[in-house]
Amino acid sequence: MPFFRRLAVFAALLLAPGLAMAKDELVIGITQFPAAFHPSIESMLAKTYILGLARRPLTAFDAQWKLVCMLCTELPTLENGLAKREGKGIAVTYTLRPDARWGDGTPVSSDDAVFTWLVGRHPLSGVASRELYQRITRVEVKGPRTFILHFDRTTFDYNAVNDFALLPAHIERPRFESAPAEYRNRTAFEQDTTNPGLYNGPFHITEVVQGSAVVLAFNPQWTGPRPAFNRIVVKTIENTAALEANLLSGGVDMIAGELGLPLDQALAFEKRQGNRFVVTTKPSLVYEHIDLNLTSPILADVRVRRALLLAADRATLTKQLFAGRQPVAHALVPQLDWVHADDLPKYPYDPAKAAALLDEAGWKLSGGIRRNAKGDPLAVELATTAGNRSRELVAQVLQAQWRKAGIEVRLVAQPPRVFFGDTVTKRRFPHLAMFAWYSAPESVPRSQLHSSMVPEADNNWAGQNYTGYADPDMDQLIDAIEVELDRVKRKRLWRDLQVKYATDLPALPLYFRADAHIWPKALKGVVPTGHQDPSTLWVEQWRWE
């Protein structure tokens, strides 16, 4: 074969989509841009996914759903003596990896743990999971890298401190101590995001293009296995059709299943492009639902909430849109979780029963629209994220189904960073907000359902109880589950919680999601987890082959 022809063939092979090109960069496409970068302020999967490349938690659940140490040397347990009962509480000892360093070379230390605890428990810091830090009565320093967390109670997950996100005290302390109430805006994670000292993982953030991309480079202070890439770019393309087009054109190398194409679009893509790309469908602990603002006079009536669910044909919706691969949800615990209960109150499609409940609640049908005694129409607003084709279709289907029941629905689609950073977090949706919860195995929903977790201006919008749900029985169930170490008894309590949830309906369950991960066939080592600890926590195992 002539030289130039051989050269042309070689170049064509290198440029063929889906083949491992000789490059040390990886471009990942996701559908959301983080509203914030502080690991403990705001709760958004896009941030979690990106920080998985740049930071390591003390503990995490791996792809086998097993709790493992990431930043610590050994997982503390009662059996190995690193966890010890003290009255009703427990003392849990963690030793940090001796080679753990922040990106500026400063060792990750016990001082960071003490500072992280002080920030987390401050009432005005804005930390989302402040309850965890409140339960820690003190942090006892035993050495530069060894510390003991003293908890006020012994919970079944006493050693899972996944949310105890260590902060670099040498950078963050002056920003916090000068004005704790302003910390969420003054943190270096927001004002100096590219400071390498904020990161202790294999990469650190070097550039942020607001709303568009986050660029990460290899962290030379990382002493774990050397990643195959020197540079990773995480591109945000909110429109899923445009995201797919970018994959085909080479604008991105892979689409993250955690925040990628909805299942229906991914299945259609696989039929067309399965010879070029790997499409892995992973059933996951993701709960698609609609949060209800229970301060709304309309939604405060449980009869209206139940009628909304009875008037929605969720079984047909999931069958037609997702080929039945995303099962209808009846409560918030996914079927894959061992504490899932199926014998719950259910709301199959029943327009007649929905109509009867609305009549009983005082919403009478008049000219095709339901109105109360004052003549006000039964009208609600349904907000969700823009650009997600499946979510937009689901919203339109629900709008049509509820219109048949005499309920007017106005659809509002917002960019994810606005929807999660402001609308949901600050409870600025008047009626309905559709999104998904990504959970860990047996994740107690304290932050979402406990009455103490309602975000308000007074607590600087901490907590994730966006519905405003407050019920003493639910509070007691959450408290009881957390401290029940007997698995059989705990599963019974979990069933009671799910029955309570399905009865009260603080949110409308839709379906349990399956994630579709798409990458070129030459990319190896990506292992989806199916829960809230994303695949990026093991990015050092990814490689071109």
Image (cartoon, helix red, strand yellow):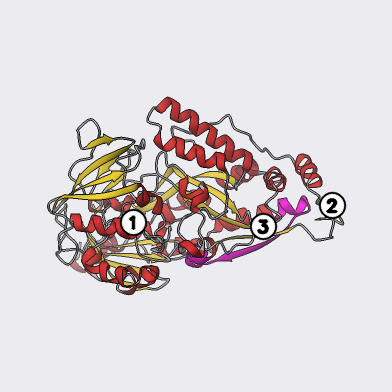
Image position, residue 348 (x, y; %): 67, 37
Of the pair 114 and 417, the residue shown nearer to us:
114
Residue 532 as seen in the image, left or right of residue 346: left
The picture quadrant where one finds residue 411 is bottom right
How far is the residue under mark 1 from the one under mark 3? 50 Å
Which of discs 1 and 3 lies nearer the camera? The answer is: 3
Any part of residue 524 in sight = no
How far is the residue under mark 3 from the one under mark 2? 21 Å
Q: Which mark is residue 296?
A: 3
> For the residue labelled by badge 3, is the local secondary structure a helix, a strand or a loop?
loop
> For the residue labelled by badge 1, is the local secondary structure a helix, a strand or a loop?
loop
Image position, residue 421 (x, y; %): 47, 65
Q: Which residue is mark 2?
A: 365
Figure check: 47 above or below 340: below
Report the residue at 55% width, 45% height from top: 322
Q: Which residue is mark 1?
A: 18
Q: Tell me which segment is drawn in magenta.
A: 400-422
Chain-order first, disc 3 or disc 2: 3
Residue 63 as seen in the image, left or right of residue 292: left
Q: Name the residue type under label 1.
A: Gly
Tell me, yes or no, whether the two marked residues, 3 and 2, touch with CB atoms within 8 Å.
Answer: no
Of the pair 54 and 454, the residue shown nearer to us:
454
